[in-house]
Amino acid sequence: MSQPKDIAVQFLQKIVAGDIRKAYQDHTVKNFRHHNAYFPGDADSLCKGMQDNHENFPDKIFTTKQVIAEGPLVAVHSLMQFNPEHTGIAVVHLFRFEGDKIAEFWDVAQILPDDSPNQNGPL
């Protein structure tokens, strides 16, 4: 059986690859809910939003930077780029698992400036 950390990353990789329905079928519970402020809280609404995003940005690049797990909770810190030239967005996806399935999901994003004065960077 895969660990929740691996399942969370696989879910996000499938989303970016455009296998959005399969990601939901393979990795979420029936009563999955999310906390993205731009969509109603059900799985179908977020799934549709992700499909629309993939149609608009089919060349997205997802780079995992850190994955942290504690009990049923997993945090994935990553860089999301709409294309290779895009500076990117630092994203933290938070997951709550029930067994080996995602039951709940949060995401927090920070657009990366082209000219940040912070030499450490957000990633």
Image (tube, grey):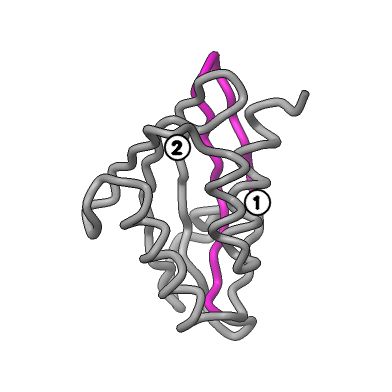
Q: Is residue 10 above or below residue 6?
A: below
Residue 24 left/right relative to 3: left
Furthest residue to the top? 71
Residue hosting label 1: 64
Occupied quadrant, residue 96? top left
Q: Residues within 10 Å of mark 2 (few under 14, many from 20)?
A: many
In magenta stretch: residue 54: no
Residue at image position (24%, 57%) is: 39
> Whole-Å distance between the Cαs marked 1 and 2?
13 Å
Residue hosting label 2: 94
Task: Residue 103: give x, y in percent of width and height.
Answer: 44, 30
Q: Earlier in the sequence, mark 1 or mark 2?
A: 1
Task: Residue 43: give x, y in percent of width and height.
Answer: 37, 47
Amino acid found under the numbered disc labelled 1: Thr
Mark toward the viewer: 1 or 2: 2
| Rendered-image quadrant of the N terminus | top right
Q: Residues within 10 Å of mark 1 (few under 14, many from 20)?
A: some
Q: Give the prevailing secondary structure in the magenta stretch.
A: strand
Q: Considering the numbered disc 2 on the image, is that residue within a helix, a strand or a loop?
A: strand
Residue at image position (62%, 25%) is: 100
* Stretch in magenta: 65-82
Q: Is residue 91 above or below residue 81?
A: above
Task: Residue 118: give x, y in percent of width and height.
Answer: 46, 60
